[in-house]
Image: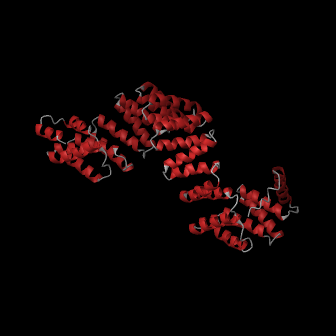
Amino acid sequence: MRDENSDYLSFEELVELVDRFEGSIQNGKAQFFDVHEFIALIEFYLDHEADEQALIALNHAQKIYPNSIEIKYKWAEYYHLVGDDDKALDLVHEVEKIEKFNPDLQYLKGEILFELDNLNAAVESFDKAISLEPDDNIELLHRISTFFLENEEINLALKYLLISYREERTNLAVLFDLGYCFERLNELSKSVRYYNEYLDINPFSAAAWYNLGIVHTKLGEFEKAIECYDFCIAVDPQYSSAYHNKGNTLASLEKYADALKVFNELAELESDNPRVFALIGECHEKLEQYDKALEAYNKSITIDPEFAEGYYGIGVVLAARKKYDLSLNFIRRAITLNPEEYDFWLGLGRVYFETNDLENSLKAYREATSLNPDLPDAYLSLAEVLLYEERFSEVEQLIDGLGNKFDSNVSIKIINAAALYLSHRPKEALDILKDAKSIDPSSIDDFINLINPDADKEFIENINKL
């Protein structure tokens, strides 16, 4: 029941009122405050989540105006703020007997019912609030949609946003939230539509360009994403997240030199962020600029001696230089700092394999599969080591155990076919190879390079018939 009691006061008058009230409490000298002044005081405290001061003001107001319906409403707001929603709802019901047609009361009731896990009743109250304010209700609609957004009820937020959009198609807050909701629901083309409508009205919103860039990335439209991040940076050169995303997008396109330029710009904004220097190190590493990579990774652990990714990066560079013993020390250090990181165990397995420590390599890969059973790389590496050790039945058991989880992964099929062929089961190997070829015709060459079955003329002929 926000009757805008505080709006008749200027900011200076409101501050003077708060000072006068708090002074009267401290001095113990009673002063007169009318109902509207109490409402303004209580509303001020509730808006600032100052629940102790709100309680003091409510108790004073209650003594002077025990029958005030406005004060009862503020009590309901207070109890809702402090989490006593049963009391809040009881008071709302009391106020509702008199204020049946107050949209703010119905809005508050909706919030309370939601907190009491009565979603359907909450929606009914919100809808009733809207029906009580049929004209110029965009603010109320957006307030409801924002409440549902904050509580991760994306579909319900979208319901009220679309009502708002039908009533006013140029409301920037509504357009922005529509873009966000459709992104969350993975309806990405619709998200693009509403962000573009927003930017047609306000092209100088860094946040909208940034979010649109994320959506284009999800769509696999990387060049468009980079263009959006560029606009974001042009609007706000301090928008560090845009540099992060632009650099990562370029790196994912293997444009490491371009990504490096972006990350170096980012380092000027975030000179104390170790992750930025790890990203710089990774770009140098991919470009085989190992001295510069080590310099960047060392910078990251100088900034934060507990930064695991920095130690891992150094380990990877040392492995590339075939300094395997030193590499193992750094990768183990990274794992000590962050034992739950899938990539660290994967990297450890690779270095152990390079040193021919196959049992430790297998242990590392198995640990990786347990940390993230939904990624194929560790399973593939595990199968490769088993194949290398001629443990063909274990390769088959491993891949059979995966079921259809990675059914489209050609590399796993090639390893499986190799194990079958080397265990003298060529027909079964051909069945797997046929499946692999249907996904990627070049996979047959990968199989031949792996097994080199040139002496088996019959098998080669059968492969050529696939």
**Which sits in the foreground, 1 or 22?**
1
Residue 15 in the figure: left or right of residue 171: right
Q: What x and y, as percent, mark residue 265?
A: 55, 30
Residue for point 60% across, 45% down: 198
**Which sits in the foreground, 181 or 95?**
181
Q: What x and y, as percent, mark residue 168?
A: 65, 53
The image quarter in which residue 314 lies = top left
Q: Quadrant of the C terminus?
A: top left
**Which sits in the foreground, 458 or 347?**
458
**Which sits in the foreground, 445 or 281?**
445
Q: Is residue 134 visible?
A: yes
- The correct choice, above or below, for 95 with respect to 407 in the image is below
Residue 75 in the figure: left or right of residue 376: right
Residue for point 74% across, 70% down: 99
Residue for point 71% across, 60% down: 51
- The correct choice, above or below, for 58 with respect to 238 in the image is below
Q: Quadrant of the N terminus?
A: bottom right
Q: What x and y, as percent, mark residue 465?
A: 17, 41
- The correct choice, above or below, for 146 with respect to 379 in the image is below
- The correct choice, above or below, for 49 with respect to 319 in the image is below
